[in-house]
Image: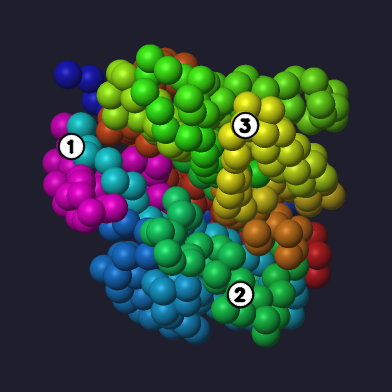
Amino acid sequence: MRNKYHGFMLVTCLLFSVNSYANPVQPALDNANQAVSHKVIEWRRHLHQYPELSNREFKTAAYIIKHLKSLGLEVKTNIAHTGIIAVLKGGHAGPLVALRADMDALPVTEDNDLPFKSTVKAQYRGQQVGVMHACGHDNHVAILMGVAESLSKIKAQLHGDVMFIFQPAEEGAPEGEEGGAKLMLAEGIFADRKPDAVFGLHVTSSMPMGVIGYREGPLMASEDSFTIKVNGRQTHGSRPWNGVDPIVTAAQIIMATQTIASRQVNVTKAPSVISFGAINGGIRSNIIPDQVELIGTIRTFDQQMRADIKKRLVHTAKTVADSAGATADVTIKHGYPVTINDLELTEQMLPTLEKVVGKQRVIRTDLITGAEDFSYYALETPGLFVFLGVTPVDVDAKTAPSNHSPQFFADEAALDVGVKLLSQLSIDYMTDNQ
């Protein structure tokens, strides 16, 4: 059996050989990062073994709070249910940098053979499910805990302050609840002092371990879910003319809405996606039902286009239904905005990304149709969100199990890269903006 952790020493050597030491804090930071390395692995394994679902991250929060208080940080808890912020005061005046990690896991039963494999069960939508950090948020939390310790050790040398944001419910709050970044902001985490910049990262199996992916401007799509209830009139399947068939009407609506993205909006401006994920209606072969329910998602990279597509979706569904003698009730649940990396901030910090892993291991990614509620922070202050590859170097990242898979696997060598990355972004930003 191959050693999935064999890249650890290689990347450690890489990390501590690429530094230019142009920043006077650099040697002390490198030593602090190296000293915390083994702890970050320990924290990550604990978090992976004991995952919790969105807005239920009680033990996870307690674990984080204990560590932050041991560092002597100013800690505020119970924000947006289980969220935490901690502030590190530097020894000198300067900007406030915010760093964010998300804490929640997914209703996924783990299918990895690990000594710290999750066997946790929980209730989700009335069913008992397995719980797993299948999106890698355990890595994010452990990395940020490590950054908090490293920067605490050199706080007297820092020209600025750091806000650590540990956020619940990035995967979405349970039905009937609020949560995540939007609620943390609504509860005032930026009210006393707005950060001058906010940074975040997300591990991904789509890139090899230690590769950093970035993109200026729009990076990840907005996400809006919708429900269309097509109302007809029930009749016998042998006599469809005696009723109004919501199944045929629903099919016509599905096909008609596909022309919105392909024919009605400017495809040269930004891509967009309208997808249907569920069709529910009817119970037997010879009964045309009264109603069919359609459920789907809208993804866009432009806020104006996002609003336009929503209007067109409603108009198309209602018009097509009316033409068939049916009606359509459309409900759109407004989700995360477009995740936009500030152009100036991205340009400013690109040398930092290259310093951390080497220029050849920093790539400009394609647009990503997934969504992230880091977007809310980036609407408030300049933000930079990047991806960190975690697939072992001897595995093809193109075929590796994806995030949200029960077989999602993160090479622990990437943890060092993550700590180095967020801590380096912090001190370089402070140095450039004193």
Counting residues from the start of the chain, the first of labels 1 and 3 encountered is 1
Q: Position of residue 230 (x, y in %)?
A: 53, 37
Q: Which residue is mark 3?
A: 325
Look at the picture and state if 396 lies above or below 157: above
Q: Are marks 1 and 3 in contact (CB under 8 Å)?
A: no
In the rendered image, which quarter is residue 82 located in? Answer: bottom left
Residue type for callout 3: Gly
Residue type for callout 2: Ala
Q: Position of residue 155 (x, y in %)?
A: 57, 74
Image disc number at residue 186: 2
Residue 213 appears in the figure: no
Counting residues from the start of the chain, the first of labels 2 and 1 encountered is 1
Image disc number at residue 114: 1
Residue 382 appears in the figure: yes
Q: Position of residue 129 (x, y in %)?
A: 20, 46
> Is residue 172 a member of the stretch shown in magenta?
no
- Alpha-carbon span between mark 2 and mark 1: 39 Å
